[in-house]
Amino acid sequence: MRLIERIGEHYKTNISNRYIRPALLQLQLDKTTWDNIESLTEKFEQYRYEGFHLDELYRQIAATARFIVATRREVAPSLRYRLSEGGSGGSDRVMRDMAVNTFTANLELFAKLLCELYTRVKDLDSVHATNKGPLYRQMPEFGDLDDLILNG
C-alpha cells in the first residue's frame, strides 16, 4: 500500500501538477485509461479498506504504462514549447520552469516506481496463484509490462 501511496503522491506533485497538467490533457488516451490512472494514483485510500483485485491492479498498471509511453513520446520532447504560452510571471513562472526542467527525471522516477509495483504484484500473484498459474501469465497484455514501462 505504501508504494501505491508513494506513486500517487509523486504523480500529483511532479507529473500531473497544475503547471504540467494542461500539456498532459492533450494526450490522446481513452477515458478508460484515464480512469485507471486516476484509480491507481488518487484512490489508494479506498483500496486501503477494500483491498485490490489483481486484475484491476494489473489494468491500472497497464494504463499507467501506456500513459508513460505516450508522455515520453508526445509531451516530454515539446513540454517547454507547449507551456511557454500563458504569460504568468514572478514566482509562478519560476515554479512552472522548475516543473518543466525536472519533468523528464520525474517521469523516469515515476516509471521506476511503477515497475517496482508491477514486480511486487507479479511476485504476490505468483505466490497466491492457483492451478492456472499467475494472472499475468494468463493474459498476454500483462506479461511484458516491465519492458513497456522502462523501455516503451
Image: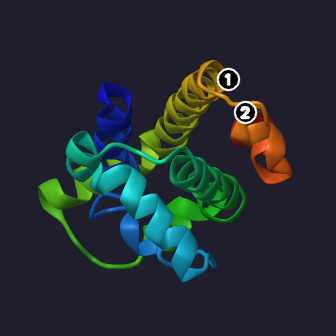
Report how far apart the C-alphas of labels 1 and 2 lie in the structure: 5 Å
Label 2: which residue? 134
Most distant residue in the front direction:
131
Q: Nearer the viewer, residue 139 or 102?
A: 139
Q: Position of residue 67 (x, y in %)?
A: 60, 59
Q: Position of residue 5 (x, y in %)?
A: 29, 37
**In the picture shown, does residue 110 fall above or below 23?**
above
Disc 1, SS: helix
**In the picture shown, does residue 1 fall above or below 27?**
above
Label 1: which residue? 126
Please state, as top left, top right, bottom left or bottom right, where the N terminus lies in the image: top left
* Residue 18 lies in quadrant: bottom left
Q: Position of residue 70 (x, y in %)?
A: 68, 61
Name the residue: 37% across, 28% down. 3
- Precedes in sequence: disc 1 or disc 2: 1
Residue 19 makes an appearance in the image: yes
Name the residue: 34% across, 40% down. 10
Q: Amino acid at mark 1?
A: Ser
Name the residue: 70% across, 53% down. 69
Q: Nearer the viewer, residue 18 or 134?
A: 134
Q: Position of residue 37 (x, y in %)?
A: 47, 60
Most distant residue in the right direction:
140
Name the residue: 20% across, 47% down. 45
Q: Are marks 1 and 2 in contact (CB under 8 Å)?
A: yes
- Going by the image, does 135 lie left or right of 93? right
Q: Nearer the viewer, residue 2 or 70?
A: 2
* Residue 93 lies in quadrant: bottom left
Q: Nearer the viewer, residue 57 or 128?
A: 128
Q: Amino acid at mark 2?
A: Pro
The numbered disc on residue 118 is none
- Going by the image, does 64 lie left or right of 7? right
Disc 2, SS: loop
